[in-house]
Amino acid sequence: MCGRYTLFASMDDIVERFMVDVFEEGIYEPSYNIAPSHQVVAIINDGRRNRLGRLRWGLIPPWAKDEKMGYKTINARGETVANKPSFRNAYRKKRCILPADSFYEWQHDGKNKTPINIKMKDGGLFGLAGLWESWKSPDGNLIHSCTVVTTEANEIMEQIHDRMPVILKPESEKIWLSPSIQDPEVLNRLIRPFDAEQMETFIVSNEVNSPKSNHEGLIIPVC
């Protein structure tokens, strides 16, 4: 599962790391607690170049009756994404990357939940595999939304949760973004647990439990 993450790197670093060619000024605001329903920074490829834009987290399929469906589709299981009606079209034709520098997961021990921050050991940016769609409301309002693809946990994550977001290897990002690649068999090879040896985890403050909390202190280890 992936229900919260962070992105606080500079815009220059994001543009350089993901080779973004087009972006709008003012679309990016650093966040230490990105939650479902928030507007998130995402990268898509239009067939010629990588574009940076904003999507609402919680994918709304074009056939949805109302936008509330997005609250149920913040994640897409990699094992079924190619066939599930909510995601199969986007899996073939509308993939995106969500830049991040860490994400959160909660470790359960009976009734207790401990928030854990997970990041790369080198502190670098990484790309979460995402899907996006456009939905038009009855009053004509157009909403562009997204979901995070998940997979089984790697060795470090399985101590916390049985799922984790799909973190793309840098060399796989071009394949994931390419609109010309629509074969599920090719894409399925990218849905794998990321190398645990490159990742580290630590406990953070319970303050992160509230989506309203958003400051640098949320990513500071508490023990």
Image (cartoon, grey):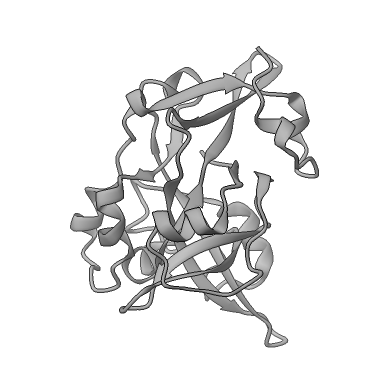
Which quarter of the picture shows residue 209?
top right
| Quarter of the figure with residue 47 | bottom left
Is residue 35 in view from this perspective? no
The C terminus is located in which quarter? top right
Q: Is residue 31 left or right of residue 117?
A: right
- Residue at point 73% right, 24% down? 205
Q: Residue at x 36, y 21 (%)?
A: 155
Rendered residue at 57%/76% (across/down) = 135
- Residue 47 can be seen, yes or no: yes
Q: Position of residue 74 (x, y in %)?
A: 56, 52
Pick the front one: 35 or 204: 204
Toward the front, the furthest residue is 12
**Percent x, y for residue 186?**
19, 57
Outermost residue, bottom side: 140
Number of callouts in the render? 0
Q: Is residue 193 left or right of residue 156?
A: left
Foreground residue among 83 and 127: 127
Residue 119: give x, y in percent of width and height.
Answer: 49, 32
Is 83 on the left or on the right of 1, as rendered? left
| Closer to the camera in the image, 105 or 218 | 218
